[in-house]
Image (tube, rainbow, N blue to C red):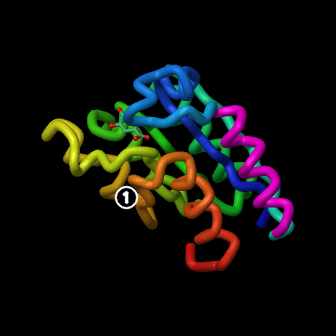
Amino acid sequence: MQNTVYVLNGPNLNLLGLREPEIYGHTTLDEIAGMLEDEARKHGLTIDMRQTNHEGMLVDWLHEAQAEGARAVLLNAAAYTHTSIALLDAIKAITTPVIEVHLSDPNTRETFRHVSYVGMAAAKTVEGHGADSYRIALETVASGEV
Ligand code: DQA
């Protein structure tokens, strides 16, 4: 098994830092990537951080994570979390552990965010800690919890 952790980000997360900062904070995705790389290095892990606005790309990357023997996937599928049976099936189709990540806590927001197809198959969910959700999720991989 590789020491690489895929960190896959879905739609609109390229605008993190600018986008609804009162909900998602001021930290950009690049800053999160830098923070994760520093954290991963301490544990002998490597981060492969990506973002796409396209659902099928996330499916392809989940398959790739399995094919490449990634240690785990941190997945913030953003709005596709709440709509995508294709992502649910992709997570079920691979044995690579997937940790669902959200900056906000979708359960305390609009009711349409209370359903998570990703969460139905994810090994764990970390949400509601802002940018720190990613770091906490990485720690669960580094500690061997996931
Ligand atoms: C999000 C929560 C989703 O409901 C929303 O569609 C996002 C971001 C989060 O990280 O808090 O785009 O995944």
Is 53 placed left or right of 128 in the picture? Answer: right
Q: Position of residue 27 (x, y in %)?
A: 60, 35
Residue underneath mark 1: 121
Q: Residue furthest left?
A: 111
- Dominant SS type (magenta): helix
Q: Closer to the camera, 93 or 119?
A: 119
Query: Magenta includes 39?
Result: yes
Q: Quarter-wise, where is residue 103 in the image?
A: top left
Secondary element under disc 1, as helix, strand or loop, is loop
Is 107 placed left or right of 20 in the picture? Answer: left
Q: Closer to the camera, 56 or 109?
A: 109
Q: Residue at (76%, 60%) from the top-left corner?
A: 39
Q: Position of residue 19 (x, y in %)?
A: 46, 22
Q: Residue at (70%, 55%) from the top-left corner?
A: 5
Q: Residue at (61%, 29%) from the top-left corner?
A: 51
Span colored in magenta: 29-42
